[in-house]
Structure formats: structure tokens, C-alpha cells
């Protein structure tokens, strides 16, 4: 529609100029000045329409990103129980460098007795070699009070590949090597522990499916294999946008160790319903 208006204005201006040229011999000085003023006015209108027809520049996203999640669930009756969770993630992307700091805390209690207490903190930096290939380094610290391994730390460097990178589907795969420090419970009754330190290999992947404008599914899987123990973690999350930058999230986390002391479960699971703020 704007293009039609611009074309019409140009043609109208051309017609005025043509009439001016045809009547130049009979025109008085006042007529000449009036026609010139009309031509200048039409040219100004054409310039204004052309400016309005130009597409607006897209908003440029800054290098910072962040996400905060809060959740709480309580039940009363024959058994009083409650659980709470807090998670955060802060990212900084500049040219080919990408940095991320994240953490999570989860706790639950039943009849005033703590039944779960889990903390995580991690840092990761990556550098893009190309559109689909990158190198990375990461530091991870885990604390799980009731696990067969109450303290675990991993330092890993490796290679990553963006297998799928579209608006709807994202799939990244990584492989790396590094060093692990793990505290293992050797006797539950006597509360005895020992340290297991050494090399570790890691395989990981993260998958995102934006199945609608207001909904997404995320899946993260990490496997860290050391000589004495293999630790793996799976995080599944569905998120639905509510309004603006607020979203409702439902997540299910599995943490497992292959080599634990007798009487200790190998696997812990955590379910959380959260309110997420995404920046």
C-alpha cells in the first residue's frame, strides 16, 4: 500500500512538472513560483513516504542473559511435608566466546526431618571454532547430603558439536576429559568416608524442542565416568510461558552413582514445579 502511495505521489509530481513545462511560455512569474512551491511540497511528501516505508530495525539483543526459578510445595495432614527449589543461570555471549554460570538448591522435609538436601554450582566457557564446532571448559560442584557420594567436583575440557541448530530444534553433543574429586560413603552406620580422586571422561548432550510459541521441552544428560565410579545426571523440563517473561516449569531430575556402599541407594530423583523468570 505504501509503495502505491509513493508511486502515485511521484506521478502527480511529474504531472505538475509537465504542466509547468507546457505552460512556461504563457505563465507569469507568480505562476512559476507557485508551481515550483507545489513541486517542492510533493517532493517532500515523497521523501516522507519513502522513509515511512523503510522496515524498522530489529531490536538488538545484548550479550547478557539470565534465568531464575523458584518453587515450593507443601502438604499437611497425617504427614507434614514440604519441598523447595531455587535455580539460577547467567550467561554472557560475545563474538565467539560463550560463558555460563548456574546453580541449583533443592530441599525437602517430612515431619520436621530433612529427607533431601542437594546443591549444585557450575561454570562453563566455550569458544566457537565454526558455526557448528566449539571447544569448552567446565567446572562442576555437587553436594548431595544423602547420596553415596555427598561431595563431587569435576573439571573437564573437551569438544562440542551443534548437530541441530534451528528455531524449533536444538541438539548439542559434547565429549571431554578431566579430573574428578569425589567423597564416597564407605560405612553408613559409622559415617565413614574416603576420597576418590583421578581422571574422568565425560559424554553429554542437551536437547531443546520449541513445540509452540509458548511452550518448550528441554532434556540434558551428562555421564562422568571415573575408574571407581560412574556418575550420571538427567534433567527433563517442560516450560509454558504465562505472561511477558514469566513461565511455569515442571522438571524431573535423576542423579545416579554406579558404586555405592551397602545400604545406600544408587539413584536420587527430584521433581519440581517452578515459576521461572527469563531475561
Image (cartoon, rainbow, N blue to C red):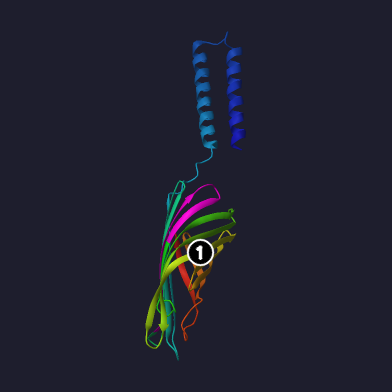
Farthest residue to the bottom: give it.
Answer: 78
* Residue plotted at (46% across, 60% down): 245
Looking at the image, residue 260 sits to the left or right of residue 163; the answer is left
Reply above or below: 197 against 148: above
Q: Nearer the viewer, residue 35 or 191?
A: 191
**In the rendered view of the protein, which quadrant contains the N terminus?**
top right
Which is the main secondary structure of the residues drawn in magenta?
strand
User: Could you say which quadrant of the image residue 7 lies in?
Assistant: top right
Q: Nearer the viewer, residue 158 or 50?
A: 158
- Name the residue tied to disc 1: 202
* Residue plotted at (42% across, 87% down): 80
Q: Which residues are magenta?
A: 114-138
- In percent of width and height, residue 147 lies at 44, 79
Q: Residues within 10 Å of mark 1 (few under 14, many from 20)?
A: many
- In percent of width and height, residue 46 lies at 54, 29
Magenta segment: does it hold 121?
Answer: yes
Farthest residue to the top: give it.
Answer: 25
User: Could you say which quadrant of the image residue 196 lies in?
Assistant: bottom left
- In percent of width and height, residue 202 lies at 50, 64
Helix, strand or loop under label 1: strand
Reply above or below: 183 against 12: below
* Residue plotted at (49% across, 16% down): 33
Looking at the image, residue 220 sits to the left or right of residue 93; the answer is right
Q: Is residue 104 visible?
A: no
- In percent of width and height, residue 113 lies at 38, 86
**In the rendered view of the protein, which quadrant contains the C terminus?**
bottom left
User: Could you say which quadrant of the image residue 179 lies in?
Assistant: bottom left
* Residue plotted at (51% across, 32% down): 48
Q: Is residue 265 visible?
A: yes
Reply above or below: 161 against 35: below
Q: Nearer the viewer, residue 215 or 195?
A: 195
Amino acid at each position: 500500500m505504501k509503495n502505491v502511495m509513493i508511486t502515485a505521489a511521484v506521478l502527480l509530481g511529474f504531472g505538475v512538472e509537465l504542466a509547468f513545462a507546457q505552460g512556461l511560455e504563457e505563465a507569469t512569474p507568480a505562476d512559476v513560483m507557485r508551481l515550483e512551491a507545489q513541486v517542492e511540497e510533493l517532493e517532500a511528501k515523497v521523501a516522507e513516504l519513502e522513509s515511512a516505508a523503510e522496515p524498522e530495525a530489529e531490536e538488538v539483543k545484548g550479550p547478557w542473559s539470565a534465568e531464575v526459578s523458584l518453587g515450593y510445595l507443601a502438604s499437611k495432614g497425617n504427614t507434614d511435608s514440604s519441598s523447595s527449589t531455587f535455580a539460577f543461570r547467567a550467561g554472557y555471549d560475545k563474538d565467539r566466546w560463550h560463558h555460563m554460570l548456574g546453580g541449583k538448591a533443592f530441599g525437602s522435609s517430612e515431619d520436621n526431618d530433612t529427607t533431601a538436601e542437594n546443591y549444585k554450582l557450575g561454570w562453563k566457557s566455550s569458544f566457537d571454532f565454526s558455526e557448528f564446532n566449539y571447544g569448552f571448559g567446565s567446572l562442576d560442584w555437587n553436594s548431595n547430603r544423602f547420596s553415596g557420594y555427598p561431595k563431587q567436583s569435576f573439571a573437564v575440557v573437551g569438544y562440542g558439536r551443534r548437530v541441530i541448530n534451528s528455531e524449533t530444534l536444538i541438539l548439542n553433543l559434547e565429549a571431554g576429559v578431566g579430573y574428578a574429586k569425589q567423597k564416597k560413603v564407605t560405612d553408613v552406620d559409622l559415617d565413614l568416608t574416603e576420597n576418590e580422586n583421578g581422571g574422568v571422561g565425560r559424554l553429554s548432550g542437551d536437547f531443546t524442542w520449541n513445540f509452540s510459541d509458548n511452550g518448550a521441552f528441554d532434556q540434558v544428560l551428562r555421564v562422568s565416568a571415573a575408574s571407581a565410579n560412574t556418575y550420571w545426571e538427567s534433567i527433563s523440563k517442560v516450560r509454558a510461558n504465562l505472561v511477558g517473561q514469566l513461565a511455569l516449569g515442571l522438571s524431573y531430575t535423576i542423579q545416579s552413582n554406579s558404586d555405592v556402599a551397602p545400604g545406600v541407594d544408587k539413584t536420587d530423583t527430584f521433581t519440581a514445579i517452578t515459576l521461572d523468570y527469563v531475561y
